[in-house]
Image (spheres, rainbow, N blue to C red):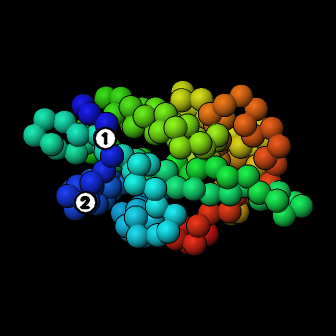
Amino acid sequence: MTIRQENLEDIPQVQKLIEKAFENVEHSDGSEPFLVEKLRKSKNFIPRLSLVASGVGNEIAGHILFTPIEIVRDDGSSQKSLALGPVSVLPTYQNKGIGGLLIKRGHDIAKELGFTSIILLGHPQYYPKFGYKPASLWNIKAPMDVPDEAFMAIELYPNALADASGCVKYPPEFGI
């Protein structure tokens, strides 16, 4: 399995993959492919942070997208971060480590690009194995009502979130 940057030719296959990956997910409303499409067209899109896992015959088994966000402090100042999501793996490839490969490669590229932290809303049983912890540990809040254990963050460098206390501001494409 190769992890690489998504290219234009991948987009139709990736859109179908995202749809299939979230088809039977309990907390999904089916909007994930549309969100990714909107984010790709936005000024916030960083092509290097849209990754695919491709296998034999260039079949795309997984996709991940990271998007710049801000953590806005009470005094109005902010700290840059990234939002992880969605991460999508075709059902036939799930539970084989592909999501983890995408996450780890995304972390490496995020660091190369100068990002120091990542925020996500996701399964509290899955993401901690990659180092994610409840964002509330840094007094970071979501802009909507979500379970504390599902709103998580990771420091890509020690103490990267030490002064980050505040509310996450997502780009308008997220519809939050």
Q: Is residue 135 left or right of residue 93?
A: right
Q: Kindly identify which residue carries mark 2.
A: 8
Dot 1 falls on a residue whose secondary structure is: strand
Where is residue 64 shown, x and y percent of the image?
40, 47
Quadrant of res 130:
top right
Dot 2 falls on a residue whose secondary structure is: helix
Identity of the residue drawn at 56% across and 52% down: 83
Q: Which numbered circle lies on residue 119?
A: none
- Say which amino acid is labelled 1: Arg
Identity of the residue drawn at 71% across and 28% down: 158
Q: How many residues crowd mark 1 within 10 Å: few (<14), some (14–19), many (20+)?
A: some
Residue reaching furthest left?
57
- Say which amino acid is labelled 2: Leu
Where is residue 102 shown, x and y percent of the image?
39, 37
Q: Is residue 68 left or right of residue 87?
A: right
Quadrant location of the C terminus in the rendered image: bottom right
Q: Kindly identify which residue carries mark 1.
A: 4
Residue closest to the eye, 109 or 128: 109
Q: How many residues crowd mark 2 within 10 Å: few (<14), some (14–19), many (20+)?
A: few
Residue reaching furthest front?
113
Residue closest to the eye, 127 or 158: 158
Q: Is residue 74 left or right of residue 117?
A: right
Quadrant location of the N terminus in the rendered image: top left
| Cα distance in 3D space between marks 1 and 2 | 13 Å
Identity of the residue drawn at 47% across and 39% down: 109
Identity of the residue drawn at 58% across and 50% down: 82
Numbered disc total? 2
